[in-house]
Image (spheres, rainbow, N blue to C red):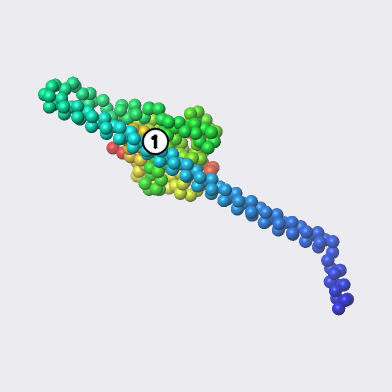
């Protein structure tokens, strides 16, 4: 019995001891790396959920502002009707009312009204420029606009909402370009690459005017290619949505044109 035990002990060489230590170290290291990866995943999901909460708060503030504007417009219209009715009752000729100021000009002026500035978690000031709704993929977000338009600012603002990248005011002649994150889930522009020709995108400007745009093209480009932002639209109203492919190597471009 003693002989057998001694014989077995002789087989535990220094080399085996060294390998055993290495295996233990590798095992502990693997567990540690798994914990780090899980922690990073949980933090990333928390960060995405927090970004979604902030974006919905921005949207709620925008809708409140639009509703307030609509209430004021309705009140003014009622006052005007009351004045005109009173003048008719008095049988006094009413002053000519300028009815041919185009709705386009009214909406342009409303769009150019100073919007309240807000500050992103990263410290960048921004204003709300429009609302985008895509029924097919079930998303509704505010489109926000920074003050500088540089890369650090855009990257920070993209964490909380889609961002205006280029173009004039929303719902005006030209190419209104919007960039959004692809989080590879249902948030932000993650499902934009699934859009097809004929799908509808709704843009509501700050005068509470909504225009439907129909997708007519979709393609991919390298990140350096910004030709999709061209303002040559032949006098038409267009929008361009920009996001990343799932591997982040290319950019997905979705082009849409006003439905008439």
Badge 1, how many Cα within 10 Å: few under 14, some, many 20+? many
Residue drawn at (37%, 39%) of the image: 63
Q: Position of residue 209 (x, y in %)?
A: 32, 35
Whole-percent x and y of residue 118? 47, 33
For residue 200, what is the image quadrant? top left
Image position of 233 (left or right of 45): left
Specify the quadrant that holds the N terminus: bottom right
Which of 198 and 26 lies nearest the eye of the viewer? Answer: 26
The residue furthest left is: 91
Q: Residue at coordinates 37% horizontally, 38% vertically from top-left?
A: 64
* Foreground of the two, 228 or 158: 158
* Residue 233 rendering spot, x and y as whole percentages: 37, 31
Nearest the eye: 141 or 239: 141
Residue 155 seen in this snapshot: no
Tell whether 188 sits left or right of 69. right
The outermost residue toward the bottom is 1
The answer, for residue 138, to whether it is visible in the render is yes
The residue carrying mark 1 is 130
Q: Secondary structure at mark 1?
A: strand
Quarter of the image where one finds residue 19: bottom right
Q: Residue at x 84, y 64 (%)?
A: 13
Disc tally is: 1
- Image quadrant for the C terminus? top left
Residue 15 appears at what percent x and percent y?
A: 83, 61
Q: Is residue 57 left or right of residue 19?
A: left
Give me the residue at 43% from left, 47% from top: 194
Front-most of 70 and 55? Answer: 70
């Amino acid at each position: 019995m003693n002989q057998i035990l001694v014989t077995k002990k002789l087989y535990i060489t220094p080399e085996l001891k060294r390998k055993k230590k290495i295996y233990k170290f590798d095992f502990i290291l693997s567990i540690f790396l798994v914990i780090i990866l899980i922690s990073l995943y949980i933090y990333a999901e928390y960060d995405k959920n927090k970004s979604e909460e902030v974006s919905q708060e921005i949207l709620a503030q925008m809708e409140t502002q639009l509703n307030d504007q609509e209430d004021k417009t309705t009140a003014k219209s009622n006052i005007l009707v009351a004045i005109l009715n009173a003048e008719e009752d008095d049988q006094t000729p009413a002053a000519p009312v300028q009815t041919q100021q185009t709705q386009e000009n009214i909406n342009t002026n409303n769009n150019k009204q100073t919007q309240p500035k807000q500050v992103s978690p990263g410290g960048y000031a921004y204003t709300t420029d429009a609302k985008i709704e895509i029924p097919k993929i079930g998303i509704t977000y505010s489109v926000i606009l920074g003050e500088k338009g540089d890369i650090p600012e855009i990257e920070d603002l993209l964490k909380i909402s889609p961002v205006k990248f280029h173009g004039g005011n929303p719902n005006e002649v030209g190419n209104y370009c919007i960039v959004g994150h692809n989080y590879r889930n249902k948030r932000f522009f993650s499902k934009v690459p699934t859009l097809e020709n004929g799908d509808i995108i709704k843009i509501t400007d700050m005068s509470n005017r909504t225009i439907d745009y129909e997708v007519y093209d979709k393609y991919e480009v390298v990140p350096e290619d910004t030709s999709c932002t061209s303002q040559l639209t032949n006098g038409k109203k267009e929008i361009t949505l920009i996001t990343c492919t799932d591997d982040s190597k290319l950019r997905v471009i979705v082009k849409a044109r006003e439905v008439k």
